[in-house]
Image (spheres, grey):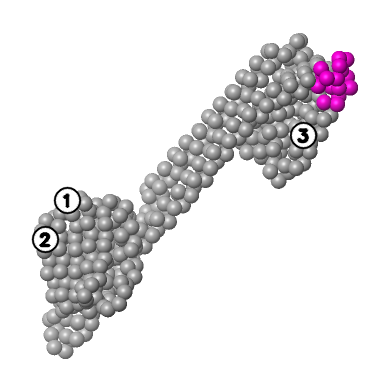
Amino acid sequence: MDISPPLTEPAGASARPSEYAEETQGRLRKLSLEIVIGALSAVGSLLVARDAHSWWDALLMAGGLLVTLLVLKRWGAGRFPGVALPALIVTAAIWLVGVLAADITTPVYSFAIVATLALVELRRHRPAVIAGITAVTIVVLAARVVTAREELAGVLLKFVIVSAGVAVGGIILTILAAGVHNLIGELEKAREREAEMAVMRERVRFAGDLHDIQGHTLHVVKLKVTLAKKLLHSDLARVEEELEEVRALVGDTITQTRELAYAQRRLNLSAELENAKNLFEAAGISAHVDRAAGVVDPRASELLGQVLRETTTNILRHAEAGEVRVTLSETGVTIVNDGAQDGPLPALRGLAALRERVVGEGGELTVEQENGWFRTAVAFP
């Protein structure tokens, strides 16, 4: 029996949402990086325009800014660790040259951005990064003090205030950029987890539907074969009739299983009511079906049919019922049988899975056991 669905359409259909989600995440990540680069570039350009006293100063600061933007590009592509150390060395050197040769502290902006990225991304090497940043800051400060012509207090005040102000600006922008970058990464992970959960839910749903179809059929086949065996030497015509019904039931189960594999299976509530009544009567159980009204909602009707099928199978398997009453209304169905055993309420198993699906559709499934009667009710208010 081949019930496997074709791989082309379903696979393509299921892949499209994932592809769209990945494309959207990629566009979001790219847009975020472009915004970050634009903001850092704008601030860097303003600093160059404000502090450059000559073409040499402008080229020096622009060089540091260019290195920073290249590093940001590599960071956005997930390849920052490979350029972290060279970028720290280059931006530190540009900062030192700016302080010694041009008497400007603006290049600290580029060094602060690269250093912040290193602290955020290189978590395992964070102590070494902190030590390196501290060492560079001390070296630059000492060089500025040694080469200064004005008083030490004035040098320190000017250097510390200006450098700290410029550095803090770069650090804040970089931290915000890293926060957005990490948030997008969390969104991607959440999407992956949601996709995995969707696959798991679909597998559980498929397994439940397959159990409903084949478990029900196998039990009915067992019942009819047992009956045919009893009648083998007394009523061959009835035996032939029972075996024909078994053949038809197996054929119908094959069809339903194939439809399930193609996600086309739909239960007919009226057919399930008639089938349940026939099965109960074949098992010697008095069955009363009251159709007060028909269920309007197709989705609710399908779920009611599944609950009716599962309950019918449970009664035939586990209950010692002599009477079953099925009541269908506009909002639900109620199945009551007198075969409840003494003791606590048994485990629901199949009905427990169906209860989750019913609740998910806005309905309610209740099970009660009292004075030898077992009641299963589903309602969609």
Residue segment shown in magenta? 141-156
Q: Is residue 171 left or right of residue 294?
A: right
The numbered dot on residue 176 is none
Q: Earlier in the sequence, mark 1 or mark 3?
A: 3
Quarter occupied by residue 317: bottom left
| The residue positioned farthest toward the top in the image shown | 54
Write the residue at 29% across / 56% down: 358
Q: Position of residue 9 (x, y in %)?
A: 37, 48
Residue indicated by mark 2? 291
Identify the residue at horizontal 22%, vertical 79% (top origin): 320
Callout 3 secondary element: helix
Q: Amino acid at mark 3?
A: Ile
Question: Residue 144 magenta-drawn?
Answer: yes
Crowdedness near tag 1: few (<14), some (14–19) or many (≥20) residues, C-alpha within 10 Å:
few
Q: Which residue is mark 3?
A: 133
Q: Residues within 10 Å of mark 2 (few under 14, many from 20)?
A: some
Residue type highlighted by circle 1: Val
Residue depth check, mark 2 versus mark 3: number of the one nearer the observer: 3
Q: Which residue is mark 1?
A: 296
Q: CA distance from mark 2 to mark 3?
A: 81 Å
